[in-house]
Amino acid sequence: MKYSFLGILLGLLFLTGLNSFSQTGEQKALESKKEQLENEIREINRLLFAERKQKGSVLDQMEALDQKINRQQELIRVTNQQSNLLNRQINANIRNISKLREELESLKTDYARMIRKSYQNRSQQNRLLFLLSSQSFFQAFKRLQYIKQYTQFRKRQGEEIIEKTEALSALNQDLTQQRKEKDLLIAQNRRVRDQLMVEVKAQKDLLQSIRQNESAYAKEIDTKQKEARAIDRQIDRLIREAIAASNREKRGSDRTASRFALTPEATLIASNFSANKGNLIWPVEKGVKKQGFGVYQDAVYPGIKHQSNGVIIATDEGAKARAVFEGEVIAILAVPGGNKGVQIKHGNYISTYYNLSELYVKKGDKVEAKEALGEIYTNRSNGLTQLKFYLYRDVTRLNPEEWIYRL
């Protein structure tokens, strides 16, 4: 053969290895995303669709259905990506198997030809005569070296056939496993699609019942919006009061400023808080995000827009709100006709935890990350336990989803 098979095989395995490495990274990312979505759907079912909570308001049911449908659609998209990736890997393996088979057949043919020739000149006498017929000692030495090299080459050819056969077997096993994984993904996707159709039908039925009684739905929306505005106003007011009070204590600070005048210690805490952007712990031990930050469409009437200045996290009854970072309690919220809340200052960052039925801290307390702040209120009319979480830098609202890990 013009080129060593071993060199060709190493080159092929190197290129295949590079491709496999990148695909393995993509596989891991997709599998991680898929696992996250499956966990979220399980938590949505457990926290928002439990039988004891089916008596909840139509607005709660509609929001929960909308959230679950979105997660299921995302899960279908991710499993489709996984299936497409497996398709590419399967096709690559089929091409590699075909190439290996061709090379193996060529190698076997060359080896058989070499064995036949060796058999024809197999006698020890022929080899001895080959050496004795040398015209000089140097030629005899070269002929002896040739016999040794020929023997080694034949041995190497046999080993290469074994290596190539094993490589072909390994690729065939990979191909079989990949096809099984693809079949599992297809079956899973089919189940998710079937469940999605059930949820979509339930959503349509609920929409129909809502539109038959629009006034009740509108009243419920209005009540929730008024409550949200009242909380937002009190959060803004308490933060401005805390800034003014803090700056009064510092000589030379502007008492009317909209920013905290930070001490060196507070500057360090703020810097550490900022450095943890995207990796802060959840304000509950377990839960699922029920409502995100920003403007969103109404689940029933898409033309209606709602504004969320924080996030809502559904959790278990009896769950505790916990500090996302070390800091100091600067205010206690108490909305008339509502529940309680806690504001914690982290340098010039403020985290707010609202909808608590019981408080474990008071103004001025120093708290550590994960420290329990109070028990989250459980609504007895719908069974939902929900924490409303807000994040500010001075008086500027921040999106908690950008700060809390995988929120």
Image (cartoon, rainbow, N blue to C red):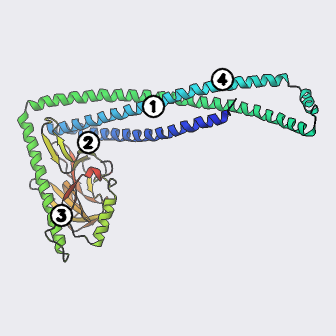
Quadrant housing residue 360 = bottom left
Which amino acid lies under the numbered mark 3 shown in the image of this protein? Ala
First in sequence: mark 1 vs mark 4:
1
Between the residue at mark 3 and the residue at mark 1, the CA separation in whole angstroms equals 54 Å
Can residue 172 be seen at all in this image of the molecule?
no
Label 4 sits on residue: 105
Which amino acid lies under the numbered mark 4 shown in the image of this protein? Glu
First in sequence: mark 4 vs mark 2:
2
First in sequence: mark 4 vs mark 3:
4
Between the residue at mark 1 and the residue at mark 2, the CA separation in whole angstroms equals 34 Å
Helix, strand or loop under label 1: helix
First in sequence: mark 3 vs mark 1:
1
Helix, strand or loop under label 4: helix
Which amino acid lies under the numbered mark 1 shown in the image of this protein? Leu
Q: Position of residue 258 (x, y in %)?
A: 17, 65
Mark nearer the viewer, 1 or 2: 1
Between the residue at mark 4 and the residue at mark 3, the CA separation in whole angstroms equals 80 Å
- The residue lying toward the viewer, choosing from 341 and 347, is 347
Helix, strand or loop under label 2: helix
Q: Residues within 10 Å of mark 2 (few under 14, many from 20)?
A: many
Label 1 sits on residue: 86
Label 3 sits on residue: 331
Mark nearer the viewer, 3 or 2: 3
Label 2 sits on residue: 47
Quadrant housing residue 49 = top left
Between the residue at mark 3 and the residue at mark 2, the CA separation in whole angstroms equals 30 Å
Mark nearer the viewer, 4 or 2: 4
First in sequence: mark 3 vs mark 2:
2
Which amino acid lies under the numbered mark 2 shown in the image of this protein? Leu
